[in-house]
Image: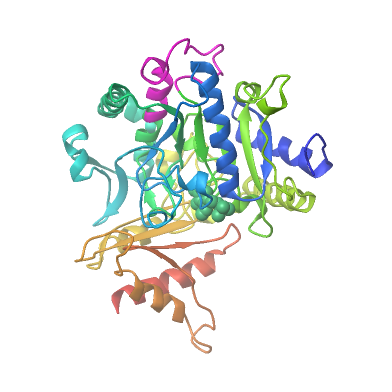
Amino acid sequence: MFAETIHEPAMALAETLLRGMRNPRLSRVFYSDNGSTGVEVAVKMGLRAARLRYGWGAGEKLGVLGLKGGYHGDTIGAMDCAEPGAYNEKIEWYEGKGHWLDYPTVLCSDGKWSVAVGEGLAEHLGRGAGYPSLHDIFDVEARERRGEHRRYEAYVTETLTRLRQQGRRFGALILEPVVLGAGGMELVDPLFQRTLVNVVRQSPHLLGASGGAPREPEDWSGLPIIFDEVFTGLYRLGRFTPSSFLGVHPDISVHAKLLTGGLVPLCATLASEHIFEAFGGSDKTDALLHGHSYTAHPVGCQVALASVREMQAMERRGDWEWAATQGWKGPDAEGQGGGAGGRHVWSSWPRQFVEELSRSDRVTGAWALGSILAIHLKDSAGAGYSSNAAMGLREALGRGREAGAGGPWNVHARVLGNVLYVMASKTTSETSIRQITDLLRESLAS
Ligand SMILES: Cc1ncc(COP(=O)(O)O)c(C=O)c1O
């Protein structure tokens, strides 16, 4: 019963999250109890704000703009934000409501880091390019100075223009920043996502009807931008928020999973003042009428507060420094606040190990960022969610080490089509990472 009330853990958590995001746009927090619901709340917020700004009638159908292979949850509204695919195609009520753009991905193949462009996109974006390191791919400002974003700009503008000509209407852009999780564990070129956000913000003329100008610099423009940080947020990728990799701030963001360290359910949807104002007015039906029995559950909020504060303390203490120095923090990090706490790109998984994996005959490529290691296996039957190429490797990890052979322990890994991924926790030790990398190496070779 959280409506029109407050309690201390909810207030303290809201302040901690808003401070941690360092996003000048965000000032409001809406609590729910799982990621899917938090996404639904975010979408309700975005769509309403767009409808009011552009003067669209209540009967006008609005969709979302997103990325192919995105995943935002399994409640029906969140599911409708994803393109048709394995998770939803047999669901009676599913109706994909949007347009999903294709995008370039990042992979280390044969020891070399590159931005890869799929067949369908090559005519717009060329063939992709190699880079000396993952850090260089994430140096989006330097890449922008070299004009690498121009092709992305043209492709997004062309897409928006075509959609407008088809009479399509959208109420929000929703993205999983940097990593598309459940949809296939893809590392998206950060420059592409940054450019997409910037083009949407600069294109009210392609997205709105009339009167589309923002009122202030921090007001949303074009479309409200939603970052679904349920999976990638709160240090999963090594930083408090993955939006810092992109250098752009969302108008709405969604946080769950690591929010409570996985102990109890909770979700927080953060929004700007301008989005909040879309729900003001004297008529009760104008309010954001969305509530669950467990909205802002005090135990959930208190656990989240402890969890977020602990992760912030670990960052301040430099508890992840051992990880950042495993080949990620090179001399180029000097003077940029390099290291686990700084602006550098790092992972719990050693860089050399990722590059070694990527040279295996069984592997197309691999990448690691923060606690995630993703291995894309070769599959003669073609990649995709129904591929079984990674199952053997998963079984070998599941057998793990027996007692007497350094065990007993095993590894629970997840398979998404031809991709196997493992995730460390924020407290996984250097020793555990070594043991798991040894097992992975052996399992791949056998
Ligand atoms: C990016 C993303 N969004 C939303 C969700 C849905 O969260 P929940 O499972 O808590 O409903 C998930 C869950 O896997 C997710 O990865």
Residues shaded magenta: 196-222
Q: Nearer the viewer, residue 113 or 45?
A: 45
Q: Look at the image and say whether residue 161 sits in the magenta stretch.
A: no
Residue depicted at x 34% and y 34%: 192
Its colouring scheme is rainbow
Quadrant of the image occupied by residue 25: top right
**Residue 334 appears at what percent x and percent y?**
46, 38
Q: Quadrant of the C terminus?
A: bottom left
Residue 392 vertical placement versus 161 (above, below): below
Residue 384 vertical placement versus 11 (above, below): below
**Residue 282 appears at what percent x and percent y?**
73, 19
Res. 311 in view? yes
Quadrant of the image occupied by residue 278: top right
Residue depicted at x 20% and y 32%: 124
**Residue 24 appears at what percent x and percent y?**
60, 24
Q: Is residue 144 left or right of residue 322?
A: left
Q: Look at the image and say whether residue 203 sits in the magenta stretch.
A: yes
Q: Nearer the viewer, residue 337 or 105?
A: 105
Residue 57 vertical placement versus 243 (above, below): above
Q: Nearer the viewer, residue 273 or 117?
A: 273
Q: Is residue 289 left or right of residue 403?
A: right
Q: Is residue 75 left or right of residue 122?
A: right
